[in-house]
Image: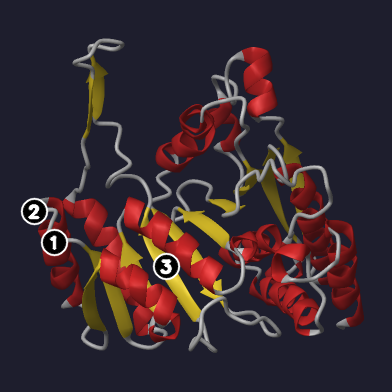
């Protein structure tokens, strides 16, 4: 059999998690399975019941050897994590953060796009199509620090931000490469006027790496001014590179400006493919609407499309994004976008789009 005839197969670990993660994961998997059949590849879904429910039952979000169980897979598909019954830092640091760090998923890529048929939540932003490249394993979300004198009047907490030259260089290089293949413009989120050590260091390293990309113009913008610009003129942004905290907040803000945080996807990438990468929607577990059939599955579907692209199945990825974009363009959407479709009804419309395209 020639190489071109070999059917490709992938093992993907599925962590539906909590809340609406349980509701949006099945629609995304159904769409991906249809596309796999159309594009001649297969996916073996390895279901993991790692969730807040497991924590309440067993005291841990995932097994002690959870990382080892994931290591031989081709990717991780996450729904959402979190419940009001458990503090967020326990659910996050018990599952998602260890996966990001043990698998060196140092790039968090978050696209924001004004989908056809949607109106932006802000004026003067008729065209939004941008990428936030977020440093994903260090920065403000480091483990350095601690607490002392717990329960006493003098109790204190110390949290240290961690910025390494290697960490900033690799996120800068990734973002600059993206910008060179798009508009040639890169905005770097900073706060060097107020954060005296880490942010000037960030600026310096970004500029140094930028010399390797003569076709890219780098524009450093203070994060507070950048947040305002994201509300007033998100159409002036194309590729944004930011530290862990800044990128986290800014990407949510931009997704809301483009319509809803419910449609935002996120890819936690190990660009070298040395370890599996993780793909998830940004929206969280949304306990206020969980179980009501109101969840928007676009974020999970879009994250699935990013996963397919990372696996090299670019045609299938494009078809998936095209399918849910077509449904929205026809005026069909879930309540968060001003529509009336349930999760199930929206999914059926997307599947119909996939079926009708040959």
Q: Which residue is mark 1?
A: 192
Q: Which residue is mark 3?
A: 132
| Number of residues whose C-alpha sits closer than 10 Å to that of mark 2, classed few (under 14), some (14–19) or many (20 or more) | few
| Number of residues whose C-alpha sits closer than 10 Å to that of mark 1, classed few (under 14), some (14–19) or many (20 or more) | some
As helix, strand or loop, the secondary structure at mark 2 comes to loop
In the image, residue 232 sits, relative to residue 6, either above or below, namely below
Q: Are marks 3 and 1 in contact (CB under 8 Å)?
A: no
x then y, percent, for residue 99: 49, 38
Q: Which one is nearer the viewer's eye here, 203 or 209? A: 203
Q: Is residue 182 left or right of residue 334?
A: left
Determine the CA span between mark 3 and mark 1: 19 Å
Determine the CA span between mark 2 and mark 3: 24 Å
Q: Which one is nearer the viewer's eye here, 313 or 283? A: 283
At a point 36% along the width and 80% down the height, the residue shown is 179
Q: Which residue is mark 2?
A: 196
N-terminal label among 3 and 1: 3
In the image, residue 184 sits, relative to residue 87, either above or below, namely below
From where the camera sits, is residue 174 visible?
no
In the image, residue 262 sits, relative to residue 349, either above or below, namely above
Q: Quadrant of residue 286?
A: top right
At a point 78% along the width and 65% down the height, the residue shown is 334
As helix, strand or loop, the secondary structure at mark 1 comes to loop
Q: Quadrant of residue 204?
A: bottom left
N-terminal label among 2 and 3: 3
At a point 77% along the width and 64% down the height, the residue shown is 335
x then y, percent, for residue 31: 81, 62
Determine the CA span between mark 2 and mark 1: 6 Å
């Amino acid at each position: 059999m020639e190489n071109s005839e070999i059917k490709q197969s992938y093992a993907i670990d599925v962590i539906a998690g909590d809340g609406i993660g349980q509701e949006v994961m099945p629609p995304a998997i159904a769409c991906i399975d249809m596309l796999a059949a159309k594009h001649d590849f297969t996916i073996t879904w390895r279901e993991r019941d790692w969730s807040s429910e497991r924590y309440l039952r067993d005291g841990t979000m995932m097994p002690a050897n959870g990382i080892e169980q994931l290591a031989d897979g081709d990717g991780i598909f996450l729904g959402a994590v979190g419940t009001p019954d458990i503090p967020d830092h326990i659910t996050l640091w018990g599952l998602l953060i260890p996966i990001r760090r043990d698998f060196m998923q140092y790039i968090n890529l978050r696209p924001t796009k004004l989908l056809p048929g949607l109106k932006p939540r802000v004026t003067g932003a008729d065209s939004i199509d941008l990428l936030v490249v977020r440093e994903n394993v260090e920065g403000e979300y480091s483990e350095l620090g601690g607490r002392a004198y717990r329960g006493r009047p003098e109790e204190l907490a110390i949290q240290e931000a961690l910025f390494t030259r290697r960490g900033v260089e690799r996120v800068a290089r990734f973002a600059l490469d993206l910008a060179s293949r798009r508009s040639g413009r890169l905005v770097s989120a900073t706060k060097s006027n107020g954060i005296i050590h880490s942010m000037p260091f960030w600026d310096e390293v970004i500029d140094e790496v930028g010399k390797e990309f003569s076709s890219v113009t780098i524009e450093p913008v203070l994060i507070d001014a950048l947040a305002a610009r994201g509300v007033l003129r998100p159409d002036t942004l194309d590729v944004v590179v930011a530290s862990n905290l800044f990128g986290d907040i800014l990407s949510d803000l931009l997704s809301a400006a483009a319509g809803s945080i419910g449609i935002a996807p996120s890819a936690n990438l190990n660009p070298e493919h040395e370890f599996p990468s993780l793909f998830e929607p940004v929206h969280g577990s949304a306990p206020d609407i969980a179980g009501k059939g109101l969840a928007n599955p676009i974020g999970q579907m879009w994250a699935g499309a990013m996963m397919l692209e990372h696996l090299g199945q670019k045609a299938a990825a494009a078809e998936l994004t095209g399918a849910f974009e077509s449904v929205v363009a026809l005026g069909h959407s879930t309540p968060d976008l001003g529509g009336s479709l349930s999760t199930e009804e929206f999914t059926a419309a997307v599947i119909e789009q996939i079926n009708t395209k040959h």
